[in-house]
């Protein structure tokens, strides 16, 4: 997957988890939690959806790399390049 495909995949997961949120105005470098009403359970749901949909394993110690859209895409790029 390319970076833009990964971004679209993340947006798809976010829209499923937070259907009332306007995702069109997301800023790339601002933490997602600061832009959306996400709590820790929502964050875990994102991680679980990535695992379920794309079989991507994200160790708990790497969760900090998934704060913003940009950092999440950068983290996932090498893991999802062959999907």
Image (cartoon, helix red, strand yellow):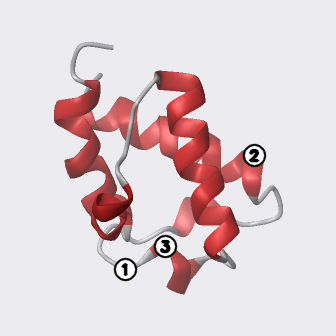
Q: Residue at x 59, y 28 (%)?
A: 52
**Residue 35 vertical placement versus 22 (above, below):** below
Asked whether the residues under the numbered discs 3 and 2 touch, taking CB atoms below 8 Å apart as contact, a structural biologist would say: no
Q: Residues within 10 Å of mark 2 (few under 14, many from 20)?
A: few
What SS does tag 2 mark? helix
Mark seen at residue 32: 3
x and y, in percent, of residue 58 in the image: 37, 45
CA separation in Å, label 1 and label 3:
6 Å
How many numbered callouts? Answer: 3
Q: Residue at x 69, y 67 (%)?
A: 41
Residue named by callout 2? 16
Q: Nearer the viewer, residue 56 or 70?
A: 56
Left or right relative to 68: residue 10:
right
N-terminal of the pair, mark 2 or mark 1, is 2
| Residue farthest toward the right in the current orientation of the protein | 20
Left or right relative to 61: residue 43:
right
Q: Nearer the viewer, residue 51 or 9?
A: 51
Quarter of the figure that contains the N terminus: top left
x and y, in percent, of residue 43 in the image: 58, 63
Q: Residues within 10 Å of mark 1 (few under 14, many from 20)?
A: some
Quadrant of the rendered structure where residue 2 is? top left
What SS does tag 3 mark? helix
CA separation in Å, label 2 and label 1:
20 Å
Quarter of the figure that contains the C terminus: top left
Residue named by callout 1? 30
Q: Nearer the viewer, residue 73 or 20?
A: 73
Asked whether the residues under the numbered discs 1 and 3 touch, taking CB atoms below 8 Å apart as contact, a structural biologist would say: yes
Q: Residue at x 52, y 49 (%)?
A: 47
Asked whether the residues under the numbered discs 2 and 1 touch, taking CB atoms below 8 Å apart as contact, a structural biologist would say: no
N-terminal of the pair, mark 3 or mark 2, is 2
What SS does tag 1 mark? loop
x and y, in percent, of residue 50 in the image: 51, 37
């Amino acid at each position: 997957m390319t970076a833009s495909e990964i971004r679209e995949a993340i947006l798809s997961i976010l829209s499923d988890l937070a259907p009332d949120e306007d995702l069109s105005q997301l800023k790339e470098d601002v933490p997602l939690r600061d832009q959306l009403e996400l709590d820790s359970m929502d964050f875990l749901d994102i991680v679980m959806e990535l695992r379920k949909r794309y079989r991507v394993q994200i160790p708990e110690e790497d969760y900090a790399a998934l704060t913003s859209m940009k950092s999440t895409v950068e983290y996932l790029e090498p893991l999802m390049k062959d999907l």
